[in-house]
Image (cartoon, rainbow, N blue to C red):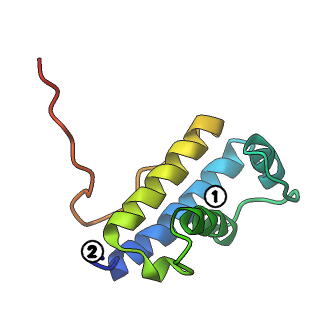
């Protein structure tokens, strides 16, 4: 397994989950509306950092069934979960957020041949 996610990345997960919860609420997507968009059931309530983190963790465990906590994510796994979550939410709602980090970006940009 690659390097374990850092304490700074743990904090970034918290900032991301809080930010996405606020953005989804501001965009008018309560959890029921959001879950209907992704064919799940839920109950009407505002997004919170905790509820979005639960969603983040659900995606994590669907990608990595052997994991039970974000503390177990490697840095590569964290990047993969973030990409699936943010892309999926953005495709369904138009709501997105860059992953907060003081660390160098983990994404590698590929040059396109001209």
Eye-nearest disc, 2 or 1: 2
Query: Where is residue 39 shown, x and y percent of the image?
Result: 78, 45
Q: Residue at x 51, y 71 (%)?
A: 14
Look at the image and tell me in which quarter the C terminus lies.
top left
* The image quarter in which residue 77 lies: bottom left
Where's residue 37, x and y in %? Answer: 75, 41
Outermost residue on the front side: it is 66
The residue that disc 2 covers is 2
* Circle 2 SS class: loop
Residues 53 and 114: in front is 114
Q: Position of residue 66 (x, y in %)?
A: 53, 77
Q: Is residue 114 left or right of residue 76?
A: left
Q: Is residue 86 rendered to the left or right of residue 31?
A: left
Q: Is residue 96 visible?
A: no
Looking at the image, tell me whether mark 2 or mark 1 is earlier in sequence order: 2
Q: How many marks?
A: 2
> Is there any visible trace of residue 48 in the rendered image?
yes
Q: Residues within 10 Å of mark 2 (few under 14, many from 20)?
A: few
Residue drawn at (44%, 81%) of the image: 72
- For mark 1, what is the residue? 21
In this rendering, the answer to whether 39 lies above or below 57 is above
- Mark 1 is surrounded, within 10 Å at the Cα level, by few (under 14), some (14 to 19) or many (20 or more) other residues, namely many
At a point 27% along the width and 66% down the height, the residue shown is: 102
CA gap between label 2 and label 1 equals 29 Å
Quadrant, the N terminus:
bottom left
Q: Residue furthest left?
A: 114
Please identify the residue farthest to the right as the structure is shown.
43
Vertical relation: 100 (above or below) 32:
below
């Amino acid at each position: 397994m690659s390097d374990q996610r850092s304490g700074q990345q743990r904090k970034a997960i918290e900032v991301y989950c809080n930010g996405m919860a606020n953005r989804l609420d501001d965009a008018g997507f309560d959890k029921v509306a959001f879950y209907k968009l992704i064919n799940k059931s839920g109950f009407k309530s505002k997004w919170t950092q905790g509820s979005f983190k639960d969603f983040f963790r659900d995606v994590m465990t669907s990608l990595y069934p052997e994991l039970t906590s974000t503390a177990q994510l490697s840095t590569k796994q964290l990047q993969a979960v973030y990409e699936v979550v943010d892309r999926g939410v953005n495709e369904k709602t138009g709501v997105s957020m860059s992953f907060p980090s003081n660390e160098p970006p983990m994404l590698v940009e590929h040059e396109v041949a001209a």
